[in-house]
Amino acid sequence: QVYLAESGGGLVQAGDSLRLSCTASGRAGTAYGMGWFRQAPGREREFVASMGYNGRTTYYADSVKGRFTMSRDGAKNTVALQMNNLKPEDTAVYYCGYTYYDGSTLTEKYRYWGQGTQVTVSS
C-alpha cells in the first residue's frame, strides 16, 4: 500500500499563485511516476501534470502549460505543483496520484490517490 498526502490548497484570487505538495509513503519505492489531476463539480477527473520517477519525462495539460510547473524530490518521495496566474476555471479538487508508468497522463494508470486538496479561485 502507498499513501499519498496533499497539501497547499486554498482560496485565492485570479492571478494569484499556490504551491501544492504531495508526499508518497508506505511502500512507495523509487521506480514510480506521480501526477496531478483535478476534478470540478459535475466533471470527470482530468489530467493536469505528471512526472516520471527519474524526472525524465514531464507532461502538462494544454490548459495549464506555461502557468503550472511540476517538480519532484526523489529523496523525500515528494512532488510539488507550482500554480501561477490562477484562473477561476482552475477551481477544483486537486489529487495526487501514484503510477508504475513513467508519468502517465491517463487517470486509469494511477494505482493510488491522495485525499485531494481544494483549490478555489475567485474572479
Image: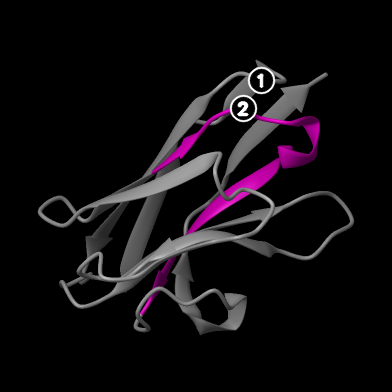
User: Which residue sits at x=15%, y=50%?
Assistant: 76
In the image, is residue 23 part of the stretch drawn in magenta? no
Q: Can the viewer see residue 35 in this picture? A: no
Task: Name which residue lies at 56% across and 39% down.
Answer: 67
The percent coordinates of residue 73 (x first, y second) are: 19, 50
Locate residue 72 relative to residue 111 in the image: left or right. Answer: left
Please tell me the numbered disc located at residue 15.
1
Of labels 2 and 1, earlier in sequence is: 1
Q: Secondary structure at mark 2?
A: loop
> CA separation, marks 2 and 1?
4 Å
Q: Amino acid at mark 1?
A: Gly
Residue 40 picture location, percent across and down: 78, 49
Q: Is residue 97 left or right of residue 34?
A: right
Quadrant holding the C terminus: top right
Task: Tell me: residue 32, above or below residue 25.
Answer: below
Q: Amino acid at mark 2?
A: Asn
Mark 1 secondary-structure assignment: loop
Image check: 74 left or right of 35?
A: left
Q: Is residue 11 above or below residue 102?
A: above
Q: Which mark is residue 74?
A: none
Query: Looking at the rendering, in which quadrant would you find the N terminus?
Result: bottom left
Q: Where are the magenta residues, as a range? A: 81-99
Q: Residues within 10 Å of mark 1 (few under 14, many from 20)?
A: some
Check the image and tell me how it is coloured.
one colour
Q: Say few, some or many: other residues with alpha carbon within 10 Å of mark 2 (under 14 / 14 to 19 / 20 or more).
A: some
> Residue 115: image x %, image y %?
53, 51
Q: Which picture quadrant has residue 53?
A: bottom left
Residue for badge 2: 85
Task: Tally the marks.
Answer: 2
Discs 2, 1 touching: Cβ within 8 Å: yes
